Amino acid sequence: MTSPALDIALSYHRAWTGKDFEKAMTYVADDIVCHTPGGPLSGAEAFRGFMGPFTEILTGSTLLSAFGDETTALLMYDTATLPVASAPGAELLTVREGKIVELRIVFDRAPFDAAREAAAGS
């Protein structure tokens, strides 16, 4: 079952996981507020700087679950990246007038920290 917010969330998710980040950005409001594990970001350009590099190391993604209503959607997925084979994540998206205006991203940074340490020879 779909909903307006879920339709936008899934379209956005399919775009960035399908390596079409520019298309994904068409679903993002200019004044998006994004809550990341590292702190909040404001504006599309700040969001681009955060999410763009992640899409470059992405090698695969599996959508595990998706729910939504008129204004919010929740996605849970597992991603595979060059440094980390399995990186589960979740996003809570708020949609207004067909654009994502707020996004809360939850993921475990520990596997990425461990991969960076291993690559540095620590």
Image: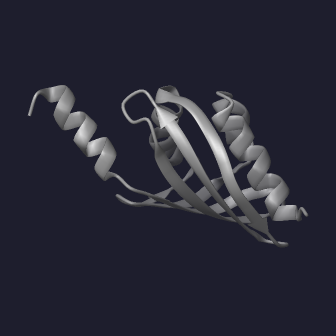
Q: Image height check: is 114 above or below 106?
A: above
Residue at coordinates 79% horizontally, 71% vertically from top-left?
71
Q: Is residue 113 left or right of residue 30?
A: left
| Viewer-nearest residue: 70 or 87 | 87
Image coordinates of residue 63 in percent, x first then y, are: 68, 48
Residue at coordinates 15% horizontally, 28% vertically from top-left?
120
| Viewer-nearest residue: 44 or 107 | 107
Quadrant of the snapshot with the C terminus: top left
Image coordinates of residue 27 in percent, x first then y, are: 74, 47
Q: How is the image coloured?
A: one colour
Q: Is residue 24 left or right of residue 103?
A: right
Image coordinates of residue 49 in percent, x first then y, are: 46, 39
Q: Is residue 121 left or right of residue 61?
A: left
Quadrant of the snapshot with the N terminus: bottom right
Image coordinates of residue 40 in percent, x first then y, are: 43, 62
Residue at coordinates 85% horizontally, 72% vertically from top-left?
70
* Total marks in image: 0
Q: Residue furthest left?
A: 122
Q: Is residue 67 left or right of residue 106?
A: right
Residue at coordinates 67% horizontally, 31% vertically from top-left?
22
